[in-house]
Amino acid sequence: MSQRVLRVSELLKREISMVLERHYRFDGVILTVHDVQATPDLKQCFVYVGIIGKALSGEYIIDKLNKQRGAIQREVHKRIVMKTSPQIFFRLDQSVDRGVKILNAIDNLPAPADPLPEGAEEPKMK
């Protein structure tokens, strides 16, 4: 991916985060913008949103954001001046949930066995 696309993606990520923080609230839920991937022609961008909290389903929130996409795009495009502003599409990023499940599995592992006393050798495997 070109440097320009990466810079534009990062700028969009920052501005979309600010717009969502200021204008969109969901009770009992925190939205985080994890990543923005712009297409090489900068006509579209995909915004990967993480949802922390269980008050509402993730699909419901993504559906609401996609329905409000026009207003969100207007706010973002007021702040970012480009020849053609990319069309925004929201996607659910469940990496946080996967990470929490992995950490819980690690926490539930049994304690390690006692180390060998000093001078004792480990049994050799054949």
Image (cartoon, helix red, strand yellow):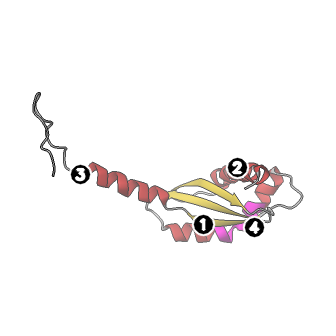
Q: Nearer the viewer, mark 2 or mark 1?
A: 2
Rendering coords of residue 9 (x, y %)? 72, 53
Nearer-N-terminus badge (4/2): 2
* SS for callout 3: loop
Q: Give the residues in magenta.
A: 65-73
Q: Is residue 49 left or right of residue 56?
A: right
Q: Is residue 121 above or below residue 2?
A: above
Q: Mark 4: which secondary structure?
A: helix
Label 2 amino acid? Glu
* Residue with the mark numbered 3: 109
Tag 1, which secondary structure? strand
Q: Are marks 4 and 2 in contact (CB under 8 Å)?
A: no
Residue at the location (63% across, 51% down)? 21
How many numbered marks are there? 4
**Which amino acid, mark 3?**
Leu
Instruction: Name the amino acid type tagged 1.
Output: Arg
Residue 9 in the figure: left or right of residue 82: left
- Quarter of the rendering occupied by the N terminus: bottom right
Q: Nearer the viewer, residue 115 or 20?
A: 115
* Image point (51%, 66%), residue name: 58
Q: Nearer the viewer, residue 6 or 32?
A: 6
Label 1, on which residue?
91
* Residue 10 disc label: 2
